[in-house]
Amino acid sequence: MLMAESAGTDVTGLKHRGRISQLVTLSAVIAYTAGNAFMSGGLGVAGREIGLSAIETGSILSFGALAGVLAAPLWGHASDTTSRRLLLLLVVPLVAAGPAIAAAVFFWPWALAASLAFPVLAGARLVQAASGAALIPIAQSLTTETTTPQQRVSGMGMLGVAISLGTLAGSVLLWLTAGLGPGAGFAAVAGLGVAAFVLTVWLFRDRDRQPEMEPGERAVPLRLVWPNLAITFLGFLAYTMVQPVLGFRFMDAFGLGSAEAAGNAGLVLTAAAVMLVIVQFLVAARKNWEATPMLRTGSIAGLVGALLLWVAQDFIQLAAAMALVGIALAFMSPANLAHMSLVTGRGAQGKLGGLNVAARGLGVAAGPICGTFLYVWQPEAPFVVAAMIVTIIVGLTRIMRTSPSPVTPSAAQSG
């Protein structure tokens, strides 16, 4: 009797420590995504002030994104085979170091020759992006351990909330520190990373090594998860394809000036972001979501939103369409993550997260290029192609396993 009570207490304690570790990791995710948002929004103007060209600042951002895509699967594999605490103690300081180096460049630009500013900032971005790519796979792995199958969608919703909050925090910091100079903004972003590192040292607890498992539990069942990875790539491809051409749409189709068009495009994107965060909070708060029906419903909502973007004739219609797209993403993203998690063995959750981050990064990298190219060819083309891509996503949701359940070693191995 006493032994049973002791065992139950131990399990409860492990789950409690796991949830705390999960929250600590999510704080690091917020610091990482805030840095991404701040760099994406602020590096162009800041770079121009110290003599960098638009091509140079664009290259810094693009190569950083590529580094994250390449590093994420490697970090995911490491999180399944080594101590996640050691990984976090390694990567979180690097997530803070990248913005700190950038802050130093912009605080004291006279300390560097003009020819050195570009390679130093490029190196800072590579450090930040390549190290931060470890965080989402680790968070996904911890979420799997601390949730039951019935709680998996809501748990993945919390990961989505952290990513969205980080992006929002980076945008807010860009606005708040605009009058203080880019160095102050990058220093604030670095401060978020330092705070996450302190929390990691203080509160994160994990096994020294991962437990022994059957070989099948360490294999990613690609036969089962390839539709999910395709949905991640195609979803972010379609979303980021539309983002950069909204301002052009306001100017060319609605006859607005550049300043007004930029402001309206910002408001439309804000509407989507606000709905994304609100709905993700609601998803995270409610338990017992079913991943497959939720994914199918979200994809249909996304298709309706994409079609409305195509036919929208004014600001209100565009804002409503983008808000619907934000709602669709808030449903699809955690459902897609949960679906993958439930059909994958417990020893491959980090590897799976790394592959998903890579798929997302490829979509984010390809979307703006494709969108602007299509717009130059035909102004309606980005919206038509985005709707076609979401139609493919709807089809993919129909061919995946209807009711995913925790995978057995033999099932994973067969994938």
Image: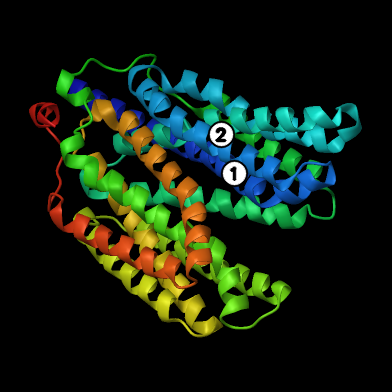
Rendered-image quadrant of the N terminus: top left
User: Which residue is nearer to you in this view: 306 or 326?
Assistant: 306
Badge 2 density bin: few <14, some 14–19, many ≥20, Cα 10 Å: many
Res. 191 visible in picture: yes
Percent x, y for residue 8?
24, 29
State the residue at coordinates (46%, 53%).
367
Asked which secondary structure carries label 1, the reply is helix
Percent x, y for residue 260?
69, 76
State the residue at coordinates (81%, 29%).
115
User: Which residue is nearer to you in this view: 64 or 177?
Assistant: 64
Percent x, y for residue 327?
40, 66
Compared across the picture, whether 141 is left or right of 213 comes to: right
Of callouts 1 and 2, the N-terminal one = 1
Q: Is residue 330 above or below residue 255?
A: above
Mark 1, residue position: 36
Mark 2, residue position: 129
Q: Amino acid at mark 2?
A: Ala
Residue 274 has which mark? Answer: none
User: Which residue is nearer to you in this view: 200 or 100?
Assistant: 100
Q: CA distance from mark 1 to mark 2?
A: 8 Å
State the residue at coordinates (37%, 55%).
235
Badge 1 density bin: few <14, some 14–19, many ≥20, Cα 10 Å: many
Q: Amino acid at mark 1?
A: Asn
Label tally: 2
Compared across the picture, whether 195 is left or right of 205 comes to: right
Q: Is residue 61 above or below residue 214?
A: below
Asked which secondary structure carries label 2, the reply is helix
Q: Is residue 253 above or below residue 337?
A: below
Percent x, y for residue 310?
41, 76
* Residues under numbered marks 1 and 2 in contact, where contact means CB atoms less than 8 Å apart: yes
Rendered-image quadrant of the C terminus: top left
Q: Is residue 374 above or below residue 346?
A: below
